[in-house]
Image (tube, helix red, strand yellow):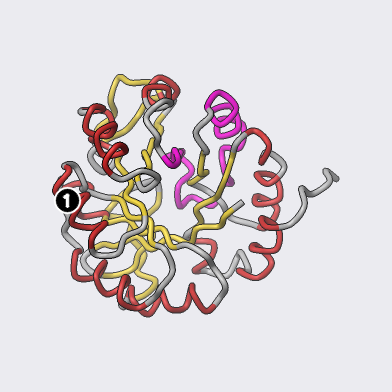
Amino acid sequence: MILYPAIDLKDGHCVRLVRGEMSEATVFNLDPAEQAKAFAEQGFSWIHVVDLNGAIAGHPVNAEAIGGILKATSLPVQLGGGIRDLERIEFWLERGVARVVLGTVAVRDPDLVREACRRWPGRIAVGIDAREGFVAIEGWVKTSTVKVLDLALRFEDSGVAAIIYTDINRDGAMGGLNVEATADLAFALTTPVIASGGASSLDDLRVIKREERSGIAGVICGRALYDGRIDPKQALAILSGPVPVEA
């Protein structure tokens, strides 16, 4: 199981939000490239990057900061936020992004996602951000009428590399991952699922690790890594090791 440290970009800085509220941003590093280097030195194997401004604007806004991250480390980068057409997907893949995450466009234009998967096999993920069981779009500003499982099932035969499932109500709130909903989604799919939103302790990681067999392939973690609640070395050992025995 892969642990993805998150770099969320707002106005060129590395921040964390609470439940997606842009007004509740805490700046953790003014230099995202330096943060990427730090994650590489701590032993992570991937970095998850989100252009928060871009997710709301509908087009990339923090391109300079993203470019700096790509230059700063050789770790594969998973990038989402405001990427909604084939040209922009190609732009980032050609510049070194390993995997592009499509969210809003997956709801509005699923055929585009399928075409992207055909053109770039293994390099397209779908981000499903849930609010009370329904998919949120446009940087979580709007909530669609599409249910989480219904959207995920649309791409089962498309070659999507992963589904990134985020429980918005838990994101940045340090209340723990929504393990039950994530495991249920992973069990219903053949596509690997990456859990996101709320990881706040090593115990949270142990709990999600126990659900690995359901199809959960990774966990995205942000605030708890920045504020020291989760030690990188211990976290990596938990997720890469054997399934923990329940207490």
Residue 200 is left or right of residue 13, and the answer is right
Residue at left offset 38%, top offset 61%: 77
Residue at left offset 64%, top offset 57%: 201
Q: Residues within 10 Å of mark 1 (few under 14, many from 20)?
A: some
Magenta residues span: 161-189
Relative to 93, residue 115 above or below: above
225 magenta-colored: no
Residue 44 is left or right of residue 147, and the answer is right
* Element assignment for label 1: helix
Relative to 95, residue 107 above or below: above
Residue 40 x/y as whole percent: 49, 74
Residue 27 x/y as whole percent: 35, 69
Residue 71 x/y as whole percent: 30, 76
Residue at left offset 57%, top offset 55%: 2
185 magenta-colored: yes
Q: Which residue is mark 1?
A: 88
Relative to 155, residue 50 above or below: below
Residue 91 x/y as whole percent: 18, 56
The quarter of the rendered structure image containing the C terminus is top right
Type of amino acid at the residue the image marks with label 1 = Arg
Relative to 48, residue 27 above or below: below
Residue 61 is left or right of residue 198, and the answer is left
Residue at left offset 40%, top offset 45%: 122
